[in-house]
């Protein structure tokens, strides 16, 4: 039962961190300045092209070469959060870009407190 508790905790923490940064990256990749969009696109491409096991090894063994030592659970959480961030950012970017161009202003101002009439 102890292992199941750690697995559920690791899953929840990973999804919370990855979801938070994934949403930020999706918004920046869609609405941010061009250099930021290119950096985030490069990050997403790099992470998606790398197997998860390599990311876990780099988080645990690779960071120790530069003087950062993490316990195994923290390294696993960090690597899973990075992986989740990249995939959720790309999925949510596609969702944002699926909004028709005719609703472009709605895309930016949707549910904004400054624009109450936009939702109608």
Image (cartoon, rainbow, N blue to C red):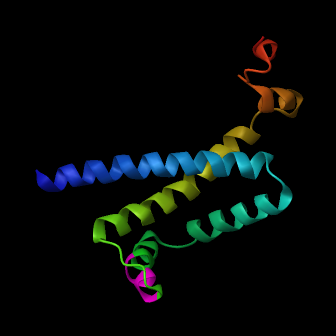
Residues 20 and 103: in front is 20
Q: Is residue 62 covered in magenta?
A: yes
Could you tell me which residue is drawn at 50 percent across and 52 percent down? 18
Could you tell me which residue is drawn at 30 percent across and 71 percent down? 71
> How many discs appear?
0
Residues 11 and 50: in front is 11
Q: Quadrant of residue 56?
A: bottom left
Instruction: Point out residue 65 in the picture as x, y percentages from the top left corner.
Output: 44, 88
Could you tell me which residue is drawn at 58 percent across and 50 percent down? 22
Above or below: residue 118 compared with residue 91? above
Instruction: Point out residue 45 in the picture as x, y percentages from the top left corner.
Output: 65, 67
Residue with the most extreme left position? 1
Above or below: residue 47 compared with residue 19? below
Could you tell me which residue is drawn at 32 percent across and 54 percent down? 10
Image check: 63 left or right of 98? Answer: left
Q: Is residue 84 covered in magenta?
A: no
Image check: 60 left or right of 92? Answer: left
Q: Which residues are magenta?
A: 60-65
Residue with the most extreme bottom position? 65
Image check: 56 left or right of 104? Answer: left
Instruction: Point out residue 74 in the picture as x, y percentages from the top left corner.
Output: 34, 65
Instruction: Point out residue 60 in the picture as x, y percentages from the top left corner.
Output: 37, 77
Residue with the most extreme front position? 67
Residues 62 and 54: in front is 62
**Mostly what secondary structure, the magenta segment?**
helix
Quadrant location, the C terminus:
top right
Q: Quadrant of residue 53?
A: bottom left
């Amino acid at each position: 039962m102890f292992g199941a508790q750690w697995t559920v905790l690791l899953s929840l923490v990973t999804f919370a961190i990855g979801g938070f940064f994934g949403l930020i990256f999706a918004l920046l990749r869609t609405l941010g300045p061009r250099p930021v969009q290119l950096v985030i696109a490069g990050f997403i491409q790099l992470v998606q092209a790398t197997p998860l096991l390599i990311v876990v090894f780099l988080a645990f063994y690779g960071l120790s070469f530069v003087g950062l030592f993490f316990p195994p659970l923290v390294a696993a959480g960090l690597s899973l959060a990075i992986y989740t961030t990249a995939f959720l950012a790309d999925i949510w970017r596609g969702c944002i870009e699926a909004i028709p161009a005719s609703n472009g202003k709605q895309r930016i101002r949707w549910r904004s407190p400054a624009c109450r009439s936009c939702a109608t």
